[in-house]
Amino acid sequence: MRAALATLAWFISVLAHAQPAWQPQRQIELVVGSGAGGGNDRNARALQKILFENKWLQNVSVVNKVGGGGALAYTYVNQHVNDAHYLVFVRQGFLSNHVLGRSAIGPADMSALAMLTSEASGIAVRAGNTALKSLPDVMERLKQDPQSLTTSLGSTRAGTPHLMLGLLAKAGGIDARRFKLVTFSGGAESTTQLLGGHIDMAAVSIDNTAPHHKSGALRILGVSSAQRLAALPDVPTFREQGYDIVMGGFTIAMGPRGLTPAQIQYWENLLERVSGSAEWKRLLAADLQDVDFKRSAATREYLRQQYELTRTLLADIGMTK
């Protein structure tokens, strides 16, 4: 009897190890919660292009599910429990909206696959604004009167630029809840408003303001990266100006809840291959993003840390109690 049980156990073990690794069996959907042309959309289409051209994965479509600050996209993907044919790209709003109760879906409700990119934000003013020539000038003005500068955050409050301002305010002993803030349709419109003199300052991702800094129309006073950006070697970091702040926007690929280890491993291996490709690096560099790849476990830990930081900063800027 014991021998028979041992043989059965061995047979089951062999069958388990013989199971093939997971592979997609039908159309893959890369879901983004913003419209065509947005940051997540550009990254999704770059990924689609590289997968197709390298023949790593042919049957891939990009699906835009716009609404609820990304919540519609997260809900759509999470309806496909255990199905690794659906991926969604998330950024800071994924965390902020869950903390604020705008979305029922948070990091613990989905399967983290891999972190792909990071990008710096910055503070920009018009080049003709001679009163604001450096980040310390801005901080001194805001310390004297937090309402004295009208600042755009891009398309939404509680995003990376807003949290970055919260960190700067904390470092400078300023009440971030008193800032005079406005939002537009996105970083591009914020930059247009700044160029037109309708606002005093823009806190947005750096890709929006970099071309105008290079042309001399705007002046970027500082960036939130750890080192100076290769594309903007004349722009100092916040750290260089006395503010020990590094905060980048991230792009993370998530799958629906309930994915198996084999499904997660398939995607983290494939996304790691994409992240190492010359074409991916070139496309990100053109968009002023950095390759910042993390596998699934490291991505889960990163999200956990960022979620706690988000809760703290949202309280600091007066959006939660």
Image (cartoon, grey):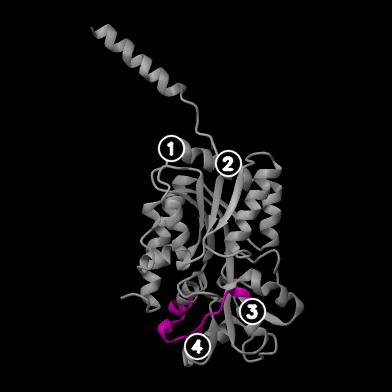
Label 3 residue SS: helix
Give the quadrant of residue 248: bottom right
63 in relation to 125, above or below? above
Query: 112 or 214: which is nearer to us?
Result: 112
Q: Is residue 176 a member of the stretch shown in magenta?
A: yes
CA gap, disc 2 to disc 3? 36 Å
CA gap, disc 1 to disc 2? 14 Å
Label 2 residue SS: helix
The tag on residue 230 is none
Give the quadrant of residue 251: bottom right
Q: Residues within 10 Å of mark 2 (few under 14, many from 20)?
A: some
Q: Nearer the viewer, mark 4 or mark 1?
A: 1
* Residue position for label 3: 191
Label 4 residue SS: helix
* Residue position for label 1: 261
Q: Nearer the viewer, mark 4 or mark 3?
A: 3
The reply to whether discs 2 and 3 touch (Cβ–Cβ < 8 Å) is: no
Q: Is residue 194 a member of the stretch shown in magenta?
A: no
- Of the image marks 4 and 1, the number of the one nearer the N terminus: 4
CA gap, disc 2 to disc 4? 46 Å
The structure residue drawn at horizontal position 53% and vertical position 90%, both measured from the top left corner, is 141
